[in-house]
Image (cartoon, rainbow, N blue to C red):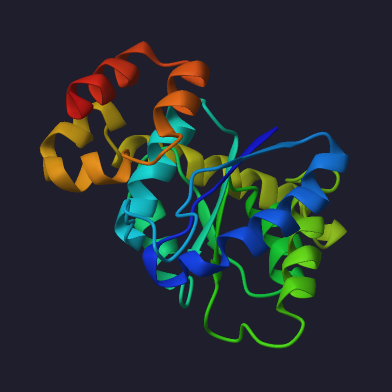
């Protein structure tokens, strides 16, 4: 599995810590981590939490990555921005039990974490334990055991609802503010990672037009 890390401007200084912790957990499990920044608080390329959602949606819908780890000060804004788009099911994760239950019950493909609120002593340990619960073993297995069947059924129902209530991303992006979208896709390694892994030619054409 390929996992994207995306940090917005208010918490960009923590990118190295989050990336290091994520790789420490994910890479021994056979996953690959792609860091899309922001890489530091001084980065010329700035991302807002809304742009985190745009970037997450582009990466997931194009098949460039299978999972997105993002966040903001509280995690709420990034979660809302991600869920505004098709093909993204993002949970707000505060602790390891959140991570475990989101993975097993909701089986999403993105998480938004609070990188300021409650981010004190042991923060890196909390991140480590969260990532362990997210990426160890198979997700979508249900919890508790007696609720497995209805939970898996509800997940399929939710997926079906999202397919009806959302348009294709290639139709949405051109209608958004061009500079907002272009800024979300202007990261140092975006084009390198995106065009190497994109599996949706329609979306790739849309991205090329926006970046032109």
Q: In which quadrant of the rendered image does the C terminus lie?
A: top left
Q: Quadrant of residue 134?
A: bottom right
Q: Quadrant of the N terminus?
A: top right
Quadrant assignment, res 206: top left
Residue 141 visible somewhere in the drawing: no
Taking depth in this image into account, of 89 and 205 the one nearest to the observer is 205
Position of residue 71 measured from the top left corner of the image (x, y, whole percent):
50, 64
135 to 87, vertically: above or below: below
- Residue 204 in the image: state x and y as whole percent: 33, 18
Q: How far from the left and from the top, in percent, is residue 77? A: 38, 68
19 w.r.t. 11: above or below: above
**Residue beneath the point at 40% across and 27% down:** 191
Q: Is residue 160 visible to us here?
A: yes
Q: Residue at x 70, y 74 (%)?
A: 95
Horizontal arrangement in the rendering, residue 97 relative to residue 59 (left or right): right
Percent x, y for residue 128? 78, 64
């Amino acid at each position: 599995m390929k996992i994207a890390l995306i940090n917005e401007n208010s918490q960009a200084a923590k990118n190295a810590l989050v990336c290091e912790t994520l790789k420490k957990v994910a890479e021994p499990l056979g996953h690959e981590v792609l860091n899309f920044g922001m890489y530091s608080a001084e980065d010329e390329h700035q991302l807002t939490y809304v742009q985190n959602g745009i970037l997450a949606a582009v990466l997931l819908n194009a098949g460039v990555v299978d999972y997105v780890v993002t966040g903001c000060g509280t995690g709420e804004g990034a979660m809302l921005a991600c869920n505004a788009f098709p093909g993204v099911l993002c949970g707000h994760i505060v602790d390891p039990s959140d991570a475990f239950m989101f993975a097993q019950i909701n089986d999403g493909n993105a998480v938004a974490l609070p990188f300021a609120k409650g981010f004190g002593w042991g923060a890196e340990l909390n991140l480590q334990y969260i990532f362990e619960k997210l990426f160890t073993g198979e997700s979508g297995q249900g919890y508790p055991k007696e609720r497995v069947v209805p939970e898996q059924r509800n997940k399929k129902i939710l997926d079906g609802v999202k397919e009806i209530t959302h348009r294709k991303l290639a139709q949405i992006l051109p209608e958004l503010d061009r500079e907002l979208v272009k800024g979300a896709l202007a990261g140092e390694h975006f084009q390198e990672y995106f065009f190497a892994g994109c599996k949706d030619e329609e979306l790739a054409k849309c991205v090329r037009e926006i970046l032109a």
